Amino acid sequence: MTRARLRDLGLSIGRLPPGPLNAITDVTGVLVGQETIVREAPSVVRSGVTVVLPENGEIWRRHLFAGAHVLNGNGEMTGMPWLEEFGLMCGPLAITGTHSVGAVHEGLVSYELKQGFAFDFCLPLVAETFDGWLSEPLALAVRPEHVHAALRSAAGGPVAEGNVGGGTGMNTHEFKAGTGTASRRVEVAGETWTLGVLVQSNYGRRERLRLDGKPIGEAITTEDVPSPWPKPRDAGSIIAVVATDAPLLPHQCKRLAQRAGLGVGRVGGAGAPGSGDIFLAFSTGNVHSAAEADRLHAARFLPDMALGPLFEAVIEATEESIWNALCAAETMTGRQGRRSHAIPLDRLVELGQT
Amino acid sequence: MTRARLRDLGLSIGRLPPGPLNAITDVTGVLVGQETIVREAPSVVRSGVTVVLPENGEIWRRHLFAGAHVLNGNGEMTGMPWLEEFGLMCGPLAITGTHSVGAVHEGLVSYELKQGFAFDFCLPLVAETFDGWLSEPLALAVRPEHVHAALRSAAGGPVAEGNVGGGTGMNTHEFKAGTGTASRRVEVAGETWTLGVLVQSNYGRRERLRLDGKPIGEAITTEDVPSPWPKPRDAGSIIAVVATDAPLLPHQCKRLAQRAGLGVGRVGGAGAPGSGDIFLAFSTGNVHSAAEADRLHAARFLPDMALGPLFEAVIEATEESIWNALCAAETMTGRQGRRSHAIPLDRLVELGQT
Amino acid sequence: MTRARLRDLGLSIGRLPPGPLNAITDVTGVLVGQETIVREAPSVVRSGVTVVLPENGEIWRRHLFAGAHVLNGNGEMTGMPWLEEFGLMCGPLAITGTHSVGAVHEGLVSYELKQGFAFDFCLPLVAETFDGWLSEPLALAVRPEHVHAALRSAAGGPVAEGNVGGGTGMNTHEFKAGTGTASRRVEVAGETWTLGVLVQSNYGRRERLRLDGKPIGEAITTEDVPSPWPKPRDAGSIIAVVATDAPLLPHQCKRLAQRAGLGVGRVGGAGAPGSGDIFLAFSTGNVHSAAEADRLHAARFLPDMALGPLFEAVIEATEESIWNALCAAETMTGRQGRRSHAIPLDRLVELGQT
Amino acid sequence: MTRARLRDLGLSIGRLPPGPLNAITDVTGVLVGQETIVREAPSVVRSGVTVVLPENGEIWRRHLFAGAHVLNGNGEMTGMPWLEEFGLMCGPLAITGTHSVGAVHEGLVSYELKQGFAFDFCLPLVAETFDGWLSEPLALAVRPEHVHAALRSAAGGPVAEGNVGGGTGMNTHEFKAGTGTASRRVEVAGETWTLGVLVQSNYGRRERLRLDGKPIGEAITTEDVPSPWPKPRDAGSIIAVVATDAPLLPHQCKRLAQRAGLGVGRVGGAGAPGSGDIFLAFSTGNVHSAAEADRLHAARFLPDMALGPLFEAVIEATEESIWNALCAAETMTGRQGRRSHAIPLDRLVELGQT
């Protein structure tokens, strides 16, 4: 059965309607760029980088309110002190493999310097999950140029999922996974808002995997479809980025970010000790420039009591993003002949429709 | 059908075995005391207070490592700055109705003063959820003496659930609920540890209610069994306290506390804006005295990488605690003839066993 | 020498000009109410409560952005989870003695209920420092009615300092102290803003006391003027509340709150282990209502990069507030004949003018 | 006058005695390595990297409890989610220029991989301050090899201060500064402990500079000794690392880290908006391995109430470290002929001894 998106299989998560693309790019101005590195020599590489680039690529000048939350901190997202202090996203988020954080960080800095952006905001956002099971860790294959390429190719429209970009070498609940995305539309305060999520998903134990509450991982065991690991185990991390056009203040973005963890929990995550479960949320509803320090700024925002529907949207879209990563990813063979199996879609359909 | 515990109905949550009582009192030395106030005049009161009293009541002298986490902060737990700074639980946790925090706080202080405990630790832990729908808020019915009574009656053994103690007037997913508890046993680092949870559960919208993934709230709608409110809505809060005999350091207790939120999320919570979802975790594995400031102390602890099974235990036991509150609580009529219905157990069994 | 304010002595702190009253009440709409309890029988009481009531007493309906910071958490400020989650101040801050937190909490709740304010916001802000050295701790002298009286008497204009309100029984750097206040005016983004601080000051060791860098506590030792304690020691806490009409978002209020600790540090505080050093900052520059959840709100704010002058204002005004508490407080005799000495103003002038 | 350390000038900070070297290397096993890059072509570079390497270089296998605090987050320290979650320092801290975070991160990863350390702990600690005023930002001069060299050369003993390592291009209170260190010895719980601080100091406005309370920056104005900037201003950041052999738990390390900010405040820092004031504290008093997840661990620790002397040691040593950076640094000319002047030591002695 060809790989597909969850909804192509007649399955879905939750009650809220998705946006037209069911992707983070449904949020106006949000671009996604991905650079995938798959090669066999001199060492086996299954890696890459994914960038989420808001404001049609003008994020370095058009800053957005943002906030982050950590469910389990065995992972990295650089730029977090800045996010906490200023509540501003002043550049793209890049997601890559654990060992490539440095190269990607330098790539974001050099891109920014070459574009002539102000020096003051060189505090890049780089997050990671570990692809070193399938991809040779010593290769340090992702270079600054890969980030440049990902930024240049960033676009709206449908987002490639599965074995692509930073998600190339990733696994989830002991199936092959990687990049996934989904979106929701919600009504709050008399207007309709769009909220999208993109995940780089690389966490979880098979037996805990659930589809909208259904125990898929108990049905498709590691005896049916082997685990990537010789002995089934809990490994890895998940990065989720939440984008919305609902106008939110920084502390409200943090509130949204924490709800991504509830979505991960519903799929079967427990914020396991080996996991870096780190979530970033940003709102395109207000645009500022931290450089304009000499005047009062204005912002619109939804009152905190009204955010309930957005919380549900985060939970649903995170859950569906993970599932889109699982459904899109194809079986991959990596270094030392290691093999990570795609989740069998026919079985999934059968189990999901019960 | 008589009210029951979830497991009495042939239903259960998760994979880990419960302790002998399936209650927080399975953790050695943890006592629970509850004082229930149900009266019709001069005003209708459905309120009370629940205390969790570790170390067989010696908690004021035998301090335990502890930590807290807030999923949504529309609620209160006093003592949180102390918990964050010292990582010590130096007295019981009391849970009550929102307006009774003051009286309960004073009750803990006066109890402590009368017992001659050191002045230095009068930073009581008082948490709350709102029972003002069924119970007259202006009554301020809970007095310091009720806390004293709850402390004096605190005991090990089975814990009364449902409409009792601080949980007396509470509702969950638009059914009657209140106090609930559960426990799990896990093996970590070659030893078996016990972890128990007690909740005061008062949150959630009907349609989101799930039993181990099964959409109960979609099946038993507010048309079948009315909501306590004229118009179905999301209201209230949940307090969870996690106790374990696994030796943990303060930052590890915080890690456990955050996982209680994943349990709430699996039942259907979203950390809704109107909700105070606040979680406390403590470990009986090390006993200290903050007063002994003149010597080195020693502690044992499980390494952070080993906490996975405890995280799962928190998630499962929180989920089952909420369900025990739902299953135990009986239909209650409160002020102005308002009525909160118990979840029908026959329907639950039918739905849960599918 | 009659007690005075620091500036009456020809001394001052820092470079920024104070407002007309050099008090937190320079911030438009900020009222202060204080209820002082000094009695000898049946037990010796030196206690009270101070309320900071913004929006001319309409704070329950006119909510303000706010945030808090803890330098050392051996103390209490209730309402912190709410502040962190919603970033809103929805009622007054009350400051009292450690054991009176409960009674004051209940007083704020009952006042609110009697005024018919919405139930949803009964998460009062009550902070404390310990007056139990001079005042009989068992007395529990502060009752809910005292808070009601403090609220009814709250007013703008000059603020009583020293042995008054919640500060009645407090000591600072081993001199008598209590309530103090100061203000600053700063220019940011082309406009002039007012920032005021009020402290309840009860912390510190003699030898560390400094006036604008000058080592006062090394000059006026406990041999010159005895410590309140038989053996000089570090005890107590400090609560500071920062008010400003500069329009700030919640995360910016938190930034201001942390700077209050730098002011405490300059006077000689170290965030000592026995100290509850907790700071609240709020901005009157935007007024909202959390109850209005059905529409978009608007806010003005100063950009984060522009807050430098406000940070300095917080540091200077905190430092001067503590000194105003020290200069205003008169020598007090308390329970068991204990005596806390006022700082001798003639020596202070002599030392300060060098 | 030759550059010197503060104590060589007959000046000092505080009351506590320093260790034999008055340096972070007084803490047993703490090594410091620095790589300095000063060149004129192809572009002017004044940069470098400093590493703090505990456990005699075995930190990758011998993990230490640690914690961090942010006074102002306009800066970076990678690895903070891990520090917060596990409370463990599992590798060196490297400090460099803002744009070099990526290269240094990669350098730490590649060093670790080459040494064959476990993959699981590749979450390096890299902090930064901005040297781009004197050093060409586009140069990206620091390469992974420089970190390798700094690690290989890391040693105990006296630490080079001023224009060296990561501090090469840095300025403080508008004088030339850079790397500085100091230490203190304190008695707690009947034993003597050593605490050392190392700073990379690059913050502050001239007029706020103080030496132990004395207003040096008001005396040596930018008219006397020019600011590095055409127009005096507040720019830059400060990183402080606190090491102690006192056995502390992770939450206690965080407590120490926050006190570094009080030291910065006493010198004249305000946590200015443009400043990344980030502090790391670690304790060598317990050694663990996160990899040993299959057994109980043991730890010794000082009770929280006893940490007061350590807090004072942090404050004093941070203050003196900054002054050692100021006193050691020589006047430097950088790109575009920009010039940062050393503080004149003769004037300093004169002012400081008054």
Image (cartoon, coloured by chain):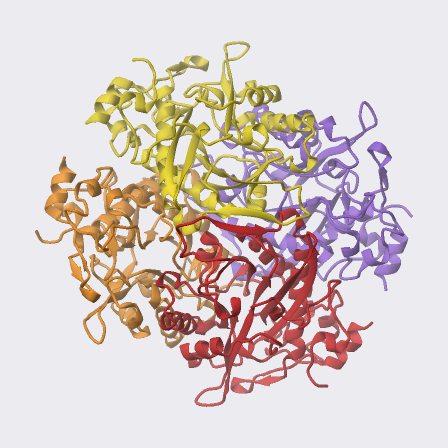
Chain colours: A yellow, B orange, C red, D purple
**In the depicted structure, whether residue A15 falls above or below residue B96:** above
Q: Residue C82: horizontal and vertical position, in percent?
A: 44, 56
User: Does residue A248 lie above or below B117 as drawn?
Assistant: above
* Vertical relation: D42 (above or below) B146: above
Residue lying farthest to the top in this orientation: A41
Where does residue D305 sit, x and y in percent of width and height?
Answer: 53, 62
The residue sitting at 24% across, 22% down in the picture is A349
Q: Residue furthest front?
A: A190
Horizontal and vertical percent for residue C314?
65, 61
When asked about the image quadrant of residue B308, the answer is top left
Q: Nearer the viewer, residue B243 or B245?
A: B243
- Residue B209 appears at what percent x and percent y? 24, 44
For residue B214, which quarter of the picture?
A: top left
- Tell whether B348 sits left or right of C261: left
Residue at x 57% of width, y 28% of height: A57
Q: Is residue D248 visible?
A: no
Q: Is residue D40 left or right of residue C221?
A: right
Q: Is residue C154 left or right of residue C183?
A: left
Between residues B211 and C198, which one lies in front from this camera angle? C198
Q: Residue furthest right?
A: D1
Q: Residue at x 22, y 76 (%)?
A: B42
| Marker count (numbered) | 0
Of the 4 image quadrants, the one containing the C terminus of chain D is bottom right
